[in-house]
Image (tube, grey):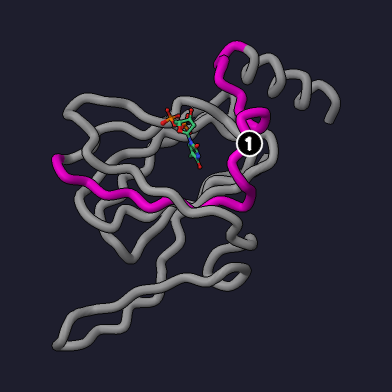
């Protein structure tokens, strides 16, 4: 079973201000096709309650904090992101939900695919059914 993973990014400490970075197929295990960011999230809102069939994602919270709940069809794990030099790699086939956004949080997301609505699984029951079929066939 694929798992989400916290990745610690390089941190170049400098009295002028610190710097972190990541590159395709280097710090993160896929080629970046798309970048988007989430901001101005009103208190209490939840984003990203869905799974992807193909795309892999990497989420870095550049400023502020949020929690990501990752559900593999049977177990849910929560990851708190509150440093700009840590990111969460979420391979495809996992249900993810972003919540608990602090005021003014800025979350950067890079994806392995271009935007494609057909790649989304937005119905949680459908996701659970798909997962149980996968497990049956193993
Ligand atoms: P979506 O990924 O559904 O966000 P959430 O699950 O948090 O609601 O994106 C919201 C809308 O933004 C979606 O309906 C289409 C649009 N969108 C794009 O056009 N391109 C993108 O790269 C993304 C991520 C979203």
Name the residue at 57% across, 30% down.
51
| Residue 128 position by quadrant | top right
| Label 1 CB-ligand 1 distance < 8 A | no
Say above or below: 97 vs 123. below
Tag 1: Cα neighbours inside 10 Å, few (<14), some, or many (≥20)? few
What residue sits right under mark 1 in the picture?
116
Residue found 58% across the figure and 68% down from its top:
24
Considering depth in this image, is 62 or 93 the residue closer to the camera?
Answer: 62
| Furthest residue toward right | 137
Where is residue 57? Give x, y as percent.
54, 49
Camera-side residue of 104 and 85:
104
Does 134 sit above or below residue 55? above
**Magenta run includes residue 42:** no
Q: Secondary structure at mark 1?
A: loop
Q: Nearer the viewer, residue 15 or 128?
A: 15
Residue drawn 17% across the image and 40% down it? 102
Q: What residue span does the magenta drawing correspond to?
A: 103-125
Q: Residue at x 37, y 48 (%)?
A: 37
Residue 131 vs residue 16, the one in the foreground: 16
Residue 74 x, y percent position in the rendering:
57, 23
Q: Is residue 126 left or right of residue 23?
A: right
In this rendering, the answer to whether 53 lies above or below 64 is above
- Quadrant (top left, top right, bottom left, bottom right) of the N terminus: top right
Residue 116 picture location, percent across and down: 63, 36
- Left or right of 103? Residue 2 is right
Q: Is residue 47 left or right of residue 133?
A: left
- Residue 95 image point, x, y percent: 54, 30
Q: On the image, which quarter does residue 77 sit in?
A: top left
């Amino acid at each position: 079973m694929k798992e989400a993973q916290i990745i610690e990014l390089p941190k170049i400490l400098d009295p002028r201000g610190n710097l972190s970075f990541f590159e395709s197929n280097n710090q993160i295990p896929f080629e970046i096709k798309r970048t988007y960011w989430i901001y101005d999230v009103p208190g209490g809102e939840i984003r990203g309650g869905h799974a992807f069939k193909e795309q892999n994602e990497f989420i870095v919270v550049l400023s502020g904090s949020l929690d990501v709940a990752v559900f593999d069809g049977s177990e849910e794990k929560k990851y708190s992101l509150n440093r700009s030099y840590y990111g969460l790699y979420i391979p495809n086939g996992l249900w993810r939900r972003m919540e608990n956004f602090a005021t003014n949080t800025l979350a950067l997301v890079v994806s392995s695919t271009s935007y494609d609505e057909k790649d989304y699984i937005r119905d949680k029951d459908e996701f659970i059914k798909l997962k149980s079929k996968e497990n049956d066939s193993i």
